[in-house]
Amino acid sequence: MNGLTKPHQYSGRLIVVEGIDGSGKSTQLQLALRYLQARGYSTFFTEWNSAEMVKKVTKKGKKKQTLTPLTFSLLHATDFAHRLVHNILPPLKAGMIVLSDRYTYTAFARDVVRGVDRQWVREVYDFAPRPDLALYFRVPIEVSVQRLVAGRAQLKDYEAGMDLGLAPDKVTSFKIFQSRILKEYEGISREYGLSEIDASQSIGQQQQIVRGLIDEMLAGYDSRLAPQETVA
Amino acid sequence: MNQIQYISHKMPYLPEGPCTGKLIVIEGTDGCGRTTQAYMLRKWLEVQGYGVMDTGWTRSKLVGQAITDLKQGHSLHRLTYCLMYATDLADRMEYQILPALRSGFIVLADRYVYTAIARGIVRGADEGWLQDLFGFAVVPDLVFYLRLGVQDLVPRVLEANKMNYWESGMDMNYGDDLYDSFVAYQSALIEQFDKMAEQDCFVTVDARQEAEVIQKQLRRVVGQYLQAPPAAAAG
């Protein structure tokens, strides 16, 4: 299939943001969405872990702590596949601009840190189309922790990688876990040629770069394209 | 002593260690008598003093029920369908199959990755992708394929009143008639099983025979294997 390594054939455009928790990627995507909407583009926003069908199972597994790295990875892949088929592909085929908060690269980083085989998880997600623009928000771990602690009271267990037994307290565990994820992201970014953005800059500075990259990516995009008939 | 072998991708976090058990798989389409044969084989092995554990398709604690529910709603896409099956097998592998193999049990699997791969291919999923996806699974010691042609399968399934939506592949719009759809779907599945049987050296057994006759053949192969597994014999 090699979905992730060759351009897709749909008339729409796919923009994804990646980065560790607290990198500011969701804020940047939100601002990008506003920018595109203001310019009159037809847009569709989607985020990871939103499919109802898998949510129940994941919740149950997390509660009873029976999820293994492998089943954790497969459940997220199922969830992603569901979201791809129901939320991402239809607007992409219809010629819209799809904005996705997290994409397959999140799984590549997180699942490998949890202990899943690096090559295997890439093959599992091979059905996913390659984004037209994949933004990777690179941020030092201290900055992300600071932002998260300031922004919300509680870190969630799985976010902090508490299931891995890295440290007895959540903040320390979070730091170790996210540092490992950060390291994976570095490799992924090189491997897939993600567009790296220095996320320690101000929100405005980053957004300016983001908008520049979006403009560049949209060259040749015809938003008036009629919905096309495509082969699945 | 043998190590546990994985089809193509060993998960790095899974511990290394000796495998004293054996994994025996029974495959075949719906209505070929798999479950009966597995039950008879289990009894026979236990009489001889072997510890036996059986594991069945979509019976994991984690997603077994979810798969059943989703099938009620007919809302599964081929990708989610295959991935759910993979999740089910992964959960059973880690909580049932691996522990049993490590402690010397004979694990009898009623269906295995081959069912998932065949169903996925018939639904249009990429074959290479399916093989990679299920690459995390343990390599079986023996795979029996209880083969039935579609013409022998139809009356059996009708008698058992089991010609249902999913076993007829109605999700694939072969036609609005349950019978036509069943024949087309099961024929496509059999074709895939036949191919895999050749590639992966399944022990193919003619499932048109009486249950006792089939069982005798399975016992002979299993008995020989347990006395002198090919790997040990070669070493």
Image (cartoon, helix red, strand yellow):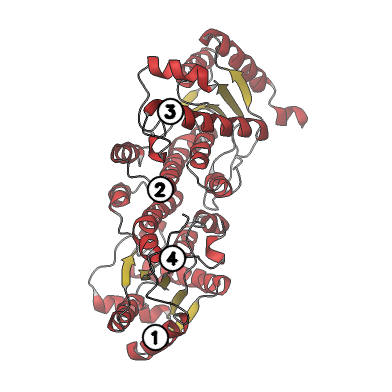
The earlier-in-sequence mark between 2 and 3 is 2
Query: In x, y percent, where is residue A179?
Result: 45, 72
4 and 1 marks on the same chain: yes
Residue type at mark 1? Answer: Arg
Residue type at mark 4? Answer: Thr
Q: Which residue is mark 1?
A: A211
Residue B80, labelled with which disc?
2
- Using the rendered view, name the quadrant where residue A47 is placed: bottom left
Q: Which residue is mark 4?
A: A106
Q: Which residue is mark 3?
A: B180
Crowd tier of the residue under label 3, counting other residues whose Cα lies within 10 Å: few below 14, some 14–19, many 20 or above: few
- Using the rendered view, name the quadrant where residue A35 is placed: bottom left
Query: In x, y percent, where is residue B166?
Result: 38, 33
Which chain is home to disc 3?
B
Which chain is home to disc 2?
B
SS for callout 1 = helix
3 and 4 marks on the same chain: no
